[in-house]
Amino acid sequence: MLSLAGAAMTRIVFAAVASSLLLLSMGIFPTSAPARVVMAEDAQGPNAEVPELNVLKVYAGKFKIEVLEPALFSGSAEGEWVLDGRFVKQSFKLENDQSKQLLTGTHLFTYDMHKKAYRCWRYYSNGYIYEAQGAWDEKEKTMTWTGPDADTSGTMRMTSTFDKDGNQTWKLTKEDPNGRVQGGEVKGKHILIK
């Protein structure tokens, strides 16, 4: 006889399986490849079925972070391909010059085939959550992420330019609903270590 907790878990698992089968039957999940469990180490790069993901290679690897303005902070970031190479998960930490941890976070980057757009979600240890859509400029090797800023009802914009060595120079701005920059800009670099 199942315990109350065991019965509840059985219902949850059944609901998850039933939902997945329903989505499959509706054609929402691709059925060309057999279902399998994918571990992070399976994905050494972007999924070949989505060529647009190649752009996001710039977020994978190990980086040294330097925040140059408004104050000098440093840190590290590491990005890896996850979920069968359909997302880059990049985690970071920032410290001040006394090695005191100031902020940590996790970013997820992907290309949404249904919306035909680059998308990212950013989660920070201070509770801030940011969702954005990206625009890639191939000629300039620049990605611009734009999304609503929950603090100001305006827009947050992060523009990153990548050099031939995989380093990233970035600028973060918050804009009010009229497009005016609020609180200045935050500028920094991600220097590729490997």
Image (tube, rainbow, N blue to C red):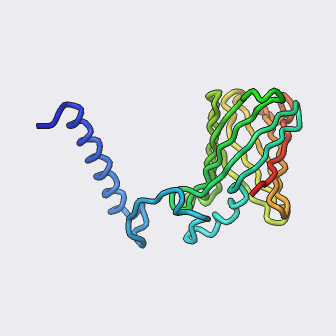
Residue placed at 87% from the left, 30% from the top? 71
Looking at the image, residue 33 sits to the left or right of residue 112; the answer is left
Quarter-wise, where is residue 5 in the image? top left
Q: Which residue reaches farthest left?
A: 1
Q: How many marks?
A: 0
Looking at the image, residue 26 sits to the left or right of residue 85; the answer is left
Q: Say which of 95 and 10 sits in front.
A: 95
Percent across and percent down for residue 55 are 70, 63
Looking at the image, residue 127 sits to the left or right of residue 136; the answer is left
Percent across and percent down for residue 187 are 86, 40
Q: Which residue reaches farthest front?
A: 98
Residue placed at 82% from the left, 57% from the top? 162
Residue placed at 88% from the left, 38% from the top? 68
Residue placed at 65% from the left, 37% from the top? 105
Question: In the rendered view, would you say 120 is above or below 95?
Answer: below
- The N terminus sits in image quarter: top left
Percent across and percent down for residue 86 are 56, 60
Looking at the image, residue 21 sits to the left or right of residue 83; the answer is left
Question: In the rendered view, would you say 91 is above or below 154?
Answer: below
Q: Say which of 164 and 176 sits in front.
A: 164
Quarter-wise, where is residue 96 in the image? top right
- The C terminus sits in image quarter: bottom right
Q: Say which of 84 and 99 sits in front.
A: 99
Percent across and percent down for residue 184 are 87, 31
